[in-house]
Image (cartoon, rainbow, N blue to C red):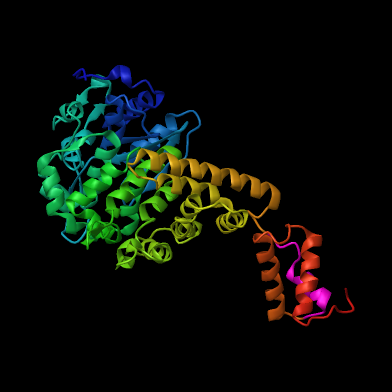
Amino acid sequence: MAKKTNYKGALQNKIFEIISQASQELNVDSYVIGGFVRDLLLKRDSKKDIDIVAVGSGIELALKVSELLPKQPKVQVFKTYGTAMLRFEDTEIEFVGARKESYHFDSRNPVVENGTLEDDQNRRDFTINALALSLNTATFGDLSDPFDGLNDLENKTIKTPLDPDITYSDDPLRMLRAIRFANQLGFEIEENSLKAITKNAERINIISGERIVDELNKILSTDKPSIGFLLLFQTGLLDIILPELTALNQVEEIEGHTHKNNFYHTLEVVDNICPNTDDVWLRWSALLHDIGKAPTKRFNKKQGWTFHGHEFLGGKMAKKIFERLHMPLNHKMKFVQKMVIMSSRPIVLSQDVVTDSAVRRLVFDAGEDVENLMILCEADITTKNPSKFKKYHKNFDIVRRKIVEVEERDHVRNFQPPISGEEIMEIYNLKPSREIGVLKEAIKEAILEGEIPNEYQAAYDFMLKRGEKLGLKRGSKE
């Protein structure tokens, strides 16, 4: 990385010229700081947001910038935090006044005072995020780098500006951010900083579940999440946040029988799934798919190690994790639950003779999520035996073809019974009763088993025969 002191040529976006003009009119100094500068110097695509620090009022600067912009975009003001935000084209720009901070031990929310640029850089989490570029007319594009962050960028190092022990104790979320940045950028955490994370791991307990999950989602969204999760594990954070996962890190041997380490297997599965999906909830499914194995592990002299019912228990455990970490308890949680509960179904199919009825049931139970389930199960193949690996993938191809054939023929993905409960009530002149449910279930089972096609007439004829066995007689309304 060429070491320069001025980056005027890199600040080509018109917004910087406008902010510079607004700063001059208000007679305040302003700087672009943080992630935008870091990614600019790394020549890395950044997400569309820019942080501006003003040595004065960030809110006043935002309002002045809005006045100078062609369409005078609306400014969102957050007086409690002394910040303001506006959108210019496809970019969000946040303005804040330079400040210095102090912390109480039981909270990550600081006591804030007005400060200088240096004060503001001191409070930043990492040296690579404390880099600032001047937007002032006389020094436009000049780099302010009080902690040698440019050198850390060059050496791919995550390092705190001040004592890491104080930095992480003050705001424990920074520990997760350090690991997330290391994972995202392919950097290493400086040795003293890594030790400080381990020392302060318990402090993560004062951070809300929502904040923790936001960082975990960003780690899961990287190309190789195992890097981040291994750092979480190494520092003791993972045992606090997801003890269900670290419980898988054990291998026992009885009478010469061992089982694989399901913790490291899980991380392999998560990495395997990443090239095939950017859906963070499917990645969560991969992360949690085996959590039921630790509590269900048993040794049987005939079978060796077993994990009977681990998928069902894992689904229940997944819900508790979502509740504990304040994750969404809506369709996203239900999706992860479904994936965990069904995670072994296609694997079992791929090892046996693939019958139409088994595939129909798989498609019926998975519904619209059957493709996601297949992606998860293919990622679950972590055998190092080349012939087994090839065989499993070949069998999965057979299962996939069967799914297409069965779906085209039998239409069970979003199964709706050919005969509704209301029609059964009308045919037999019944009020709501157990018999209606029995008939509907019998029709569904007959279709899934392939006894009858998924067609109205076949279902109607089947219903009449089954109704007769139940002693039902058609009513006058037929």
- Nearer to the camera, 57 or 358: 358
Q: Is residue 463 above or below residue 366?
A: below
Residue found at the far right of this picture: 476
* Quadrant occupied by the N terminus: top left
Q: Quadrant of residue 308?
A: bottom left
Residue found at the far bottom of this picture: 471
Query: Where residue 71 sits in the image (x, y, percent)?
Result: 51, 31
Please tell me how many numbered marks the rendered image carries: 0
Q: Quadrant of residue 185?
A: top left
Residue plotted at (40% across, 34% down): 48
Query: Where residue 378 sits in the image (x, y, percent)?
Result: 44, 45
Residue plotted at (45% across, 29% down): 69
Residue 109 appearing in the image? no
Q: On the picture, is 72 further left or further right than 21?
A: right
Give the extent of the magenta segment: 416-430
Query: Where residue 254 sits in the image (x, y, percent)?
Result: 22, 63
- Nearer to the camera, 31 or 452: 452
Q: On the picture, is 450 further left or further right than 4?
A: right
Q: On the picture, is 242 further left or further right than 104?
A: right
Q: Is residue 346 above or below residue 461?
A: above
- Nearer to the camera, 91 or 269: 269
* Quadrant occupied by the C terminus: bottom right
Residue plotted at (61% across, 55% down): 360
The answer to whether residue 418 is magenta is yes
Residue plotted at (68% across, 52% down): 411
The answer to whether residue 70 is magenta is no
- Nearer to the camera, 106 or 287: 287
Query: Where residue 233 sits in the image (x, y, percent)?
Result: 22, 51
Residue 129 appearing in the image? yes
